[in-house]
């Protein structure tokens, strides 16, 4: 074995292999978001780890800069540091924002337009991760694949690290320099342990917020501090094998991680160890270093920030209103590449140079851009999402629930979307027991990566207990989504958040993996309890999922966008071909669920089953509109017009069944 050679502490020399790592990271992320299926499989389901690679690289580089400056000068220039950060990050961010606004204007409906405006506003103060955490925690939120600025969450995590870590690093260096590595190492262990615990308790919190991500950036910091203290270790045949193993760990993660992989968690150590081995041991003299330092890898690495910024808005806007083909996705990737190259030479490089863009000029441009984005944000909120169409009637106000309300509605958000219409039609005679994402059956729990285990069961059981003990309530309406819970599939690939790490559990038989059996057992328990307490039970079969964003139903007329409070658009409001789908798609989606409900109907003849889909579908199509008015507010929830229509149908059937 060759003896390991140590060299002097590193200077801030350019390391081409770092750009090569950036290339792997950005390509992994882009192909992951493209969801490119080849030979029946998406080969890049684990491509999300590209973001984690970026985190380690960022932690390494920032710490390298800070500690090297402290070593050479004994001090650190904060203004210079943050100016360099601003020059690198902000110009491209603003360019992508301003280019995307016309597309958002044209393609997004009022609700989505407001979410878009809020997302770009949050990116200005690097709070995107907190914004998207709060938005995604809102059940039924817009499909993440069509949120144009979702990718800025990772930018926010990095910038939050940049804001506080220099102060922490300098404090440690001056006060506990001898223990710098130990303190950083301990913080890595604490943050990693936190991430692993939180992954099973609140995966959304864990994914977006910095607390479970700090350890990844700190790993990069540890590498930089280790190099500074002990020098680089990049020679010897045994050492040369470590970058190869590191590259293997990265590619293993990209190819074999998927949406069910707990992340970030201990599993995330696999790619993090991989990138750490490359940073620590790769050089231009060994195989991996030579590959990563080659022109193709370095070239892609240099444009990686531009590519990251461009790709998600391109993909998101292109997905709206259509199911993309593989050819479409290849076009998206090609467009991303072209724009990235242009941006690198026209935006990134000029703004990084103080000779080309003076500091005063930079400040004027940045403050002007902030003012424009702020004005756009305020306009979007005040104009109700720049609403470009109006529906032809005035909606009544929702009455409050009467103290003597005799009807209770129990269920998830799809029971909730009946609430407005039922309250209006009964003049407040409804008491709502809605809990988003929860199946309204005794001792049946449902959770996904946004919900805590046991939360739904606890809420539903408490609701049923309250109803049973309420002598005024004599009628109980149960309603819920069906196939999305029982088949664990998202209709037309919309709102995939619902089926990510989703579980449906019978609390009395926790090992029963048959979701239809879980539903039937819960249904029987619930109905028997309610009937036994003297309640009439009604089960409303939920409306068909629309399977597309509701704004695709609306005729686009760009001239009316500029008159959000103007007169009603003449002609059709509804773009009929884009607001319906073939009936057989619904049948294929719901037949197994409906067959189970038919079985329950035979077993419980006293329970009234109301079939809303028969009113929303005919023999040819299922419709998202009625009398030229859209009925849905998103991919599957009714808007207020839809709620009024559904309530009218429910109450009409109840009257008919009395005769």
Image (cartoon, rainbow, N blue to C red):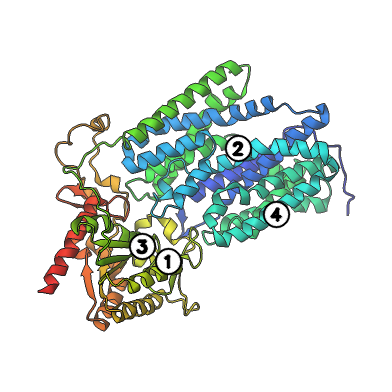
Earlier residue among tags 1 and 2:
2
Instruction: Report which quarter residue 285 is drawn in.
Output: top right
Residue 44 visible, this angle: no
Q: Residue at x 72, y 26 (%)?
A: 77
Q: Nearer the viewer, mark 1 or mark 4?
A: 1
Between disc 1 and disc 2, the foreground one is 1
From the image, tell me which residue sits under label 4: 190
The quarter of the rendered structure image containing the C terminus is bottom left
Task: Give the answer, above or below, for where 627 lies relative to 103.
Answer: below
Q: Is residue 261 above or below residue 170?
A: below
The numbered mark at residue 526 is none
- Rounded to the nearest angstrom, the CA distance separating label 1 from label 2 is 38 Å
Mark 2, secondary structure of its residue: helix
Of the two numbered discs 1 and 4 on the same chain, state the one appearing first in sequence.
Answer: 4
Cβ atoms at labels 1 and 2 below 8 Å apart: no
Looking at marks 3 and 2 on the same chain, the residue that comes earlier in the sequence is marked by 2
Disc 2 marks which residue?
A: 159
**Distance from Cα at disc 1 to Cα at disc 4:** 33 Å
Q: Residue at x 62, y 41 (%)?
A: 22
Q: Quadrant of the N terminus?
A: bottom right
Crowd class of label 1 (few under 14; some 14 to 19; many from 20; radius 10 Å): some
């Amino acid at each position: 074995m060759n003896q390991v050679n140590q060299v002097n502490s590193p200077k801030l020399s350019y390391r081409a292999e770092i750009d090569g790592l950036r290339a792997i990271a950005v390509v992994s992320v882009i192909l992951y978001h493209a969801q490119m299926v080849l030979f029946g499989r998406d080969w890049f389901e684990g491509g999300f780890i590209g973001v984690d690679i970026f985190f380690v690289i960022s932690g390494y580089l920032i710490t390298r800069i800070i500690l090297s400056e402290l070593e050479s000068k004994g001090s650190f220039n904060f203004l210079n540091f943050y100016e360099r950060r601003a020059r690198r990050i902000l110009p491209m961010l603003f360019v992508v924002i301003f280019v995307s606004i016309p597309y958002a204007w044209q393609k997004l409906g009022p609700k989505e337009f407001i979410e878009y405006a809020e997302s770009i506003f949050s990116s200005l103060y690097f709070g995107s991760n907190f914004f998207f955490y709060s938005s995604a925690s809102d059940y039924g939120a817009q499909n993440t694949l069509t949120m144009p600025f979702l990718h800025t969450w990772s930018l926010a995590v990095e910038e939050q690290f940049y804001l506080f870590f220099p102060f922490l690093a300098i404090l440690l260096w001056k006060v506990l320099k001898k223990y710098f590595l130990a303190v950083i190492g301990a913080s890595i262990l604490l943050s990693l342990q936190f991430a692993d615990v939180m992954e099973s308790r609140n995966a959304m919190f864990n994914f977006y917020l910095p607390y479970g991500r700090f350890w990844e950036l700190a790993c990069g910091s540890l590498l930089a501090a280790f190099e500074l203290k002990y020098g680089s270790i990049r020679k010897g045949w045994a050492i040369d094998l470590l970058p190869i193993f590191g590259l293997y760990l990265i590619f293993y993660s990209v190819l074999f991680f998927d949406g069910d992989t707990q992340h970030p968690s201990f599993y995330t150590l696999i790619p993090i160890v991989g990138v750490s081995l490359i940073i620590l041991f790769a050089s231009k003299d060994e195989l991996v270093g030579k590959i990563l330092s080659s022109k193709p890898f370095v070239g892609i690495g240099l444009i990686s920030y531009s590519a990251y910024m461009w790709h998600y808005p391109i993909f998101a806007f292109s997905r709206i209103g259509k199911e993309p083909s593989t050819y479409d996705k290849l076009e998206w990737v090609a467009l991303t590449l072209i724009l990235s190259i242009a941006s690198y030479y026209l935006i990134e490089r000029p703004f990084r140079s103080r000779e080309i863009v003076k500091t005063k000029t930079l400040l004027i441009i940045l403050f002007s851009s902030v003012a424009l984005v702020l004005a756009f944000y305020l306009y979007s909120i005040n104009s109700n999402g720049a609403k470009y169409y109006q529906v032809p009637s005035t909606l009544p106000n929702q009455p409050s629930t009467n103290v003597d309300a005799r009807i209770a509605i129990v269920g998830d958000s799809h029971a909730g979307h009946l609430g407005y219409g039922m309250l209006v039609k009964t003049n407040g005679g409804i008491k709502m027991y809605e809990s988003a994402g929860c199946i309204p059956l005794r001792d049946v729990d449902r959770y996904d990566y946004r919900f805590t285990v046991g939360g739904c069961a606890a809420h539903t059981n408490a609701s049923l207990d309250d109803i049973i003990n309420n002598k005024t309530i004599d009628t109980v309406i149960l309603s819920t989504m069906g196939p999305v819970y029982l088949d664990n599939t998202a209709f037309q690939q919309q709102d995939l958040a619902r089926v990510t790490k989703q579980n449906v559990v019978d609390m009395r038989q926790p090992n029963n993996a048959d979701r239809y059996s879980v539903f039937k057992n819960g249904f029987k328990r619930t109905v028997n309890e309610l009937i036994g307490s003297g309640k009439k039970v009604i089960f409303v079969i939920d409306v068909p999922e629309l399977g597309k964003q509701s704004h695709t139903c609306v005729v686009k007329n760009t001239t009316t966008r500029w008159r959000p409070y103007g007169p009603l658009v003449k002609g059709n409001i509804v773009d009929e071909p884009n607001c319906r789908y073939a009936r057989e798609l619904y049948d294929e989606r719901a037949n197994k669920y409906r067959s189970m409900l038919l079985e329950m109907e035979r077993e419980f003849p006293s329970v009234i089953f109301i079939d809303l889909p028969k009113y929303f579908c005919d023999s040819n199509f299922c419709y998202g509109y009625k009398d030229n008015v859209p009925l849905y507010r998103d991919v599957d929830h009714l808007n207020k017009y839809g709620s009024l229509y559904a309530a009218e149908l429910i109450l009409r059937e109840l009257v008919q069944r009395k005769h």
